[in-house]
Image (cartoon, rainbow, N blue to C red):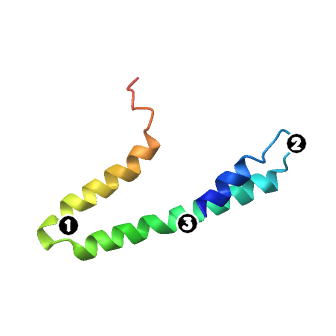
Amino acid sequence: MLIVAFSLVLLLGDTSPVVFLLVITAISGIPQGLNNPANQNALYYQAAQEQLASLALILFGKSISCFFAQGVTGS
């Protein structure tokens, strides 16, 4: 599915309609959005009871790092 989305990105140009961009975003974003909860459920299902807290922190750290990819700076 992602190969299709990335192939469509190659067709983008200056005069491409916004709808075309939204279709590409949906093709690449929806499968990724469904994959994250599936990974989390599989990890929680297979983990021992003692490891759940550390696994939750790992998953939270992965998701929050997307927002702070450039780093956090204090002012």
Residue 10 rendering spot, x and y as whole percentages: 73, 46
Per the model, the C-alpha gap separating discs 3 and 1 is 26 Å
Q: Is residue 50 left or right of residue 45?
A: left
Q: Which mark is residue 52?
A: 1
Q: Distance of mark 1 from mark 2, alpha carbons? A: 50 Å
Q: Relative to residue 66, is residue 23 drawn left or right? A: right
**x and y percent of residue 22 in the render?**
73, 56
Which of the numbered marks, if any, corresponds to residue 15? 2
Q: Which mark is residue 72?
A: none
Q: Which residue type carries mark 3?
A: Pro
Amino acid type indicated by mark 2: Thr
Identity, as a three-letter code, of the amino acid under mark 1: Leu
For disc 2, the neighbor class at 10 Å (few under 14, some 14 to 19, many from 20) is few
Q: Secondary structure at mark 3?
A: helix
Q: Is residue 72 above or below residue 15?
A: above
Q: Is residue 50 left or right of residue 22?
A: left
For the view shown, which residue lies furthest in the bottom direction?
A: 45
Q: Secondary structure at mark 1?
A: helix
Tell me the mark number nearer the camera, choosing from 1 and 2: 2
Q: Which mark is residue 31?
A: 3
**32 or 52: nearer the eye?**
32
Viewer-side residue, 72 vs 10: 10
User: Which of the 4 image quadrants contains residue 29?
Assistant: bottom right
Q: Earlier in the sequence, mark 3 or mark 1?
A: 3
Is residue 60 or residue 28 the one in the foreground? 28
Q: Are marks 3 and 2 in contact (CB under 8 Å)?
A: no
Instruction: Tell me the crowding category of disc 3: few under 14, some 14 to 19, or many 20 or more residues within 10 angstroms, Cα based.
Output: few
Q: Residue at x 81, y 51 (%)?
A: 18
Q: Position of residue 51 (x, y in %)?
A: 15, 65
Task: Spot the residue most to the top.
Answer: 75
